[in-house]
Amino acid sequence: MEPTQLDTIQNKIFSVRGVQVMLDSDLAILYETETKFINRAVKRNQLRFPEAFAFQLTESE
């Protein structure tokens, strides 16, 4: 059975710090752009991305 787009997206969702997250690299693939552009958008629009929504992972995570 071929995975659907929804299955592909669901496989990219992880639980970190008790919340469900997607990595910037996976979002870049989903939106067909480069990771640096995702990160730049977050940095330029910090009020739209509160810390609970967009945060940096630690080495152990």
Image (tube, helix red, strand yellow):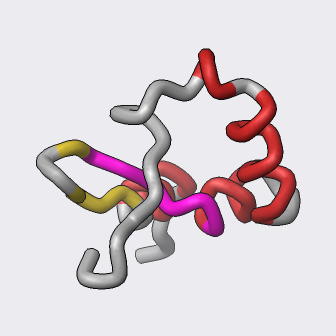
Please tell me which residue is depicted at 61% across the width and 18% down the height of the picture: 48
Q: Can you name the residue that lies furthest to the bottom here?
A: 60
Residue 4 image position (x, y, % from top left): 51, 59
Residue 34 image position (x, y, % from top left): 85, 64
Question: Image height check: is 29 above or below 41?
Answer: below
Q: Can you name the residue that lies furthest to the top here?
A: 47
Q: Per the image, is 23 magenta?
A: yes
Residue 61 image position (x, y, % from top left): 27, 75
Question: Image height check: is 2 above or below 31?
Answer: below
The number of discs equals: 0
Question: Image height check: is 38 above or below 14?
Answer: above
Q: Please state if 27 lies on the left or on the right of 13 as rendered.
A: right
Image quadrant assignment for residue 35? bottom right
Q: Per the image, is 54 magenta?
A: no
Q: Please state if 9 lies on the left or on the right of 40 as rendered.
A: left
Please tell me which residue is depicted at 49% across the width and 63% down the height of the picture: 8
Please tell me which residue is depicted at 82% across the width and 62% down the height of the picture: 36
In this view of the protein, which residue sits in the foreground, 35 or 1?
Answer: 35
Residue 1 image position (x, y, % from top left): 41, 76
Question: Image height check: is 6 above or below 41?
Answer: below
Q: Can you name the residue that lies furthest to the left here?
A: 18
Q: What span is in magenta?
A: 20-25
Q: Please state if 28 lies on the left or on the right of 47 as rendered.
A: right
Image quadrant assignment for residue 47? top right
